[in-house]
């Protein structure tokens, strides 16, 4: 890559994409960001609004870019939209766009827990997307993130909403483990993966250094807020999730939460050389709130 790279980002108004666009813009990377809806551009950024990522609109604009970061995905299904369409077929569409526009590198956010043994619909769709990518002949980096936390992530928004009412409900025992990573580390690592050969054709867990129980996470997050933590039966959570596609926790949100997935942080650290922030320390300092 000579000079400043030109990077395409899909799903531009999403949580990871918005943070990544800001970071890359500050690093003077030239951006072409695509979304279905209008959004405010950062410096060095060209925006494309396209509902269905129409090749006729996109190809002339994105051709010969250095890499594409594919951040489109859904984690909840409804009668209007399903995993196969968004997580699998859309990924295939993006791969075809990359090939036609001679973009050689693709970066993708899959999910921690994805494997060929999985029985979860969401993970199956991510697994199929991973397979399309690894078989595409493009250079790729696939990240499998745990919870990515920072301002405006879904978990933080959920907890803040509950804290306002001085009562936090947690599904089941809360003893299952999560391994969050901070968004500021995530955007640095994605930036690095665009050009660093160490990331080439790798599938890497995107996880923080400290696995911790969900209960501990919630306790530390809400420390000093006088909020009461209530454990609500999983049955109750699942009943709500099954019958309401707009519930706070969808079925797969619950499956992922209680799935107890742990990732290989050491591998991430070895490849990136980055010392990721300790989520426990961030929680203790109150800076995640
Ligand atoms: N955040 C996490 O903790 C986490 C953890 C594991 C995996 N991931 C994966 O990382 C990716 C990005 O996550 P995120 O947290 O940034 O999610 P997000 O905020 O929900 O953003 C996803 C974006 O996907 C686009 N999108 C959704 N449905 C679409 C459709 N039908 N057609 C076209 N575009 C559509 C939207 O972009 P526009 O509105 O701009 O069109 C949306 O903003 C997802 O694939 C997710 O599964 C995230």
Image (spheres, helix red, strand yellow):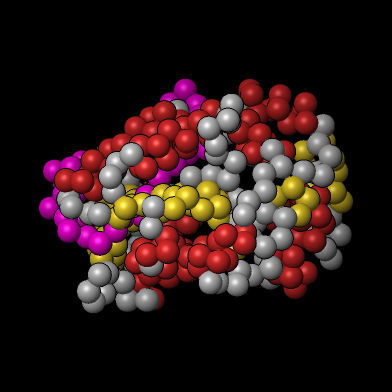
Residue at (84%, 39%) from the top-left corner? 173
Answer with the quarter of the image where residue 248 lies.
top right
Answer with the quarter of the image where residue 56 lies.
top left
Is 77 colored magenta in this rendering?
yes
- The percent coordinates of residue 257 (x first, y second) are 68, 41
Image quarter (top left, top right, bottom left or bottom right) of the C terminus: bottom right
Image quarter (top left, top right, bottom left or bottom right) of the N terminus: bottom left
- The percent coordinates of residue 154 (x first, y second) are 60, 50
Residue 175 appears left or right of 31:
right
Res 14 visible: no
Camera-nearest residue between 99 and 40: 99
Res 77 visible: yes
Residue at (45%, 28%) from the top-left corner? 82
- Where are the magenta residues, as a range? 53-81
Answer with the quarter of the image where residue 265 lies.
bottom right
Number of numbered discs present? 0
Residue 144 appears left or right of 43:
right
Residue at (87%, 51%) from the top-left corner? 228
Residue at (80%, 61%) from the top-left corner? 220
Whether 195 is drawn above or below 206: the answer is: below
Is 45 colored magenta in this rendering?
no
- The percent coordinates of residue 43 (x first, y second) are 31, 73
Residue 284 appears left or right of 254:
right
- The percent coordinates of residue 209 (x first, y second) are 67, 62
Whether 156 is drawn above or below 284: the answer is: above
């Amino acid at each position: 890559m000579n000079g400043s790279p030109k990077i395409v980002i899909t799903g531009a108004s999403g949580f990871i994409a918005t943070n990544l666009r800001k970071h890359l813009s500050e690093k003077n990377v030239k951006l072409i960001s695509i979304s279905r809806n209008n959004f405010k551009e950062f410096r060095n950024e060209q925006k494309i609004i396209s509902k269905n990522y129409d090749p006729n609109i996109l190809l002339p604009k994105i051709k010969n870019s250095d890499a594409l970061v594919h951040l489109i995905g859904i984690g909840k299904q409804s009668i209007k939209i399903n995993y196969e369409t968004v997580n699998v077929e859309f990924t295939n569409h993006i791969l075809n766009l990359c090939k036609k526009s001679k973009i050689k590198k693709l970066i993708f956010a899959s999910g921690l827990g994805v494997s060929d043994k999985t029985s979860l619909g969401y993970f199956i769709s991510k697994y199929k997307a991973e397979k399309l990518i690894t078989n595409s002949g493009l250079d790729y980096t696939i990240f499998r993130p745990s919870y990515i936390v920072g301002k405006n992530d879904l978990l933080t928004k959920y907890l803040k909403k509950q804290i306002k009412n001085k009562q936090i409900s947690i599904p089941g025992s809360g003893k299952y483990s999560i391994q969050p990573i901070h968004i500021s580390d995530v955007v640095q690592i994605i930036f690095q993966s665009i050009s660093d050969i160490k990331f080439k054709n790798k599938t890497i867990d995107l996880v923080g250094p400290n696995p911790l129980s969900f209960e501990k996470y919630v306790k530390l997050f809400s420390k000093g807020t006088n909020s009461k933590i209530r454990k609500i039966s999983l049955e109750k959570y699942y009943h709500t999730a099954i019958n309401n596609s707009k519930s706070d926790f969808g079925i797969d949100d619950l499956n992922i939460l209680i799935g107890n997935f742990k990732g290989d942080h050491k591998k991430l650290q070895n490849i990136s050389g980055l010392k990721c922030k300790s989520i426990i320390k961030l929680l203790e300092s109150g800076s995640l709130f």
